[in-house]
Amino acid sequence: MNTEEDSRLHMATAEAHAPAQGVPSPCPMHGLAHRARLAARTLAQSSSSERDKALWAAASALRESATTILEANARDLEASTANAAFRDRLTLTPERVEAMARGLENIADLPDPVGQILEEWSRPNGLRIRKVATPVGVIGVIYESRPNVGADAAGLCIKSGNAILLRGGSESLHSARAIHAAMQTGLRNAGLPEDAVLIAPDSDRRHVADMLTASGLVDLIIPRGGRSLVERVQREARVPVLAHAEGLCHTYVHAAADHAMARRIVLNAKMRRVGICGATETLLVDAAIASVLLPQIVADLAEHGCTFKADAAAREIMPDLPAATEKDFATEWLDAVLNVAVVDGVDEALDHIARFGSSHTEAIVTADEAVAVRFMNGVTSAVVMWNASTQFCDGGEFGFGAEIGIATGRFHARGPVGVEQLTTFRYEVIGNGQVRP
């Protein structure tokens, strides 16, 4: 990063610590949240074309700043001592910077969710009532190693009329700052307030606690990280939380599966990118075909560097596989490690998923439609696939442009969270002089 860029970042840090005019700021993050709240008012009243212009401008700024972003990422990578899967999540390349830019353009091309009339009806007294989509307000996103999260999350928030307060992990600090600068350039070029996208000034851990207690300033917290982060946010937050648990995703290969299809899907579901939350962590193979198909699948994945943890039934077929423990089946590896279990039919597969799953994404491979429907109705996960890789659980793949996270709760939003899920609603009641008797 050049001297001018360093200077700009130091100035941004100083500004972040300064309280908003006329408002006492007990801590840096609350000061930033107040600024974001003021910006959110303007953003909520902006036109769709203004917000789209900001996204296109931010995409251009990302491309123009690619060298600066990659230099910042190199500093983060140089300081990292993490394993290969973690470093892959942290690493930016010219292709990944371009993907971030295209993602913003894809978001800009989506229909505007703000102001959409969701429902409309009339009452016998002549009152007209309509339910209208509105921005949430200020959204706080706490994320860890993946620097592209900042661009995706900011883009989705701009499109949906929300301000965003970002707190990236210390391991991606330089990358996150460089990306944040590009997002603010887009806002500035579109004539929208730069404070609609703000970022923590440094990697101080207290910023997380301050965001979680910013009741009245932050309207929604979205954590993007491992189990310990999500559990802490859910435990300490004094504002609403939209979160997902671990990505303990399963792929069940049913007895009626096409073998070539199953091998292709499982290889992709596990090994395409082992460090994402949609990667399959446990393979369930039907006992009726396991003796033939399991050795083939294991050979496919082993050729790509995968290792295995197998239950007793799987080890009867392949005795050389390491034995799995219950803890293994409850582990999100985020690495080239796959749990393997042989199950006797769809009910046993559903029982295994109910016991060890995290309600993220499950898949079944089968040519039997009745079995597929039974499986899809039997899981409680936010996303279920039929004859497709679990790695398709992604906002971009769903046509959302990007995602701000995967929600596994039962209320408001489930699965990839895009612009529609980042809106709430109000009721508008239109009368012509009615009074209530």
Image: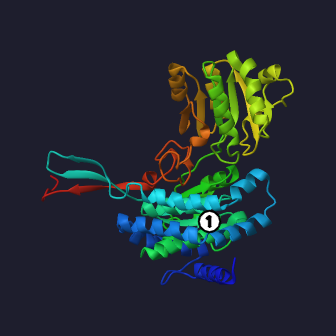
Q: For the point 62% across and 45% down, which residue is it? A: 245
Quarter placement of the N terminus: bottom right
Q: Nearer the viewer, residue 271 or 25?
A: 271
Residue sitting farthest toward the top: 288
Is 87 placed left or right of 182 in the picture?
A: right
Mark 1 lies on a secondary structure that is strand
Which residue is the site of mark 1? 167
- Residue 14 point in image, percent of width and height: 62, 82
Q: Position of residue 55 (x, y in %)?
A: 47, 65
Residue 214: name its quadrant. Answer: bottom right
Q: Is residue 79 left or right of residue 252?
A: right
Where residue 98 appears, as percent x and y from the top left, is: 58, 61
The answer, for residue 239, to whether it is visible in the render is no
Name the foreground residue: 144 vs 265: 265
Q: How is the image coloured?
A: rainbow
Left or right of 214 in this view: 270: right
At label 1, the amino acid type is Arg
Residue 241 in view: yes
Q: Residue at x 46, y 66 (%)?
A: 56
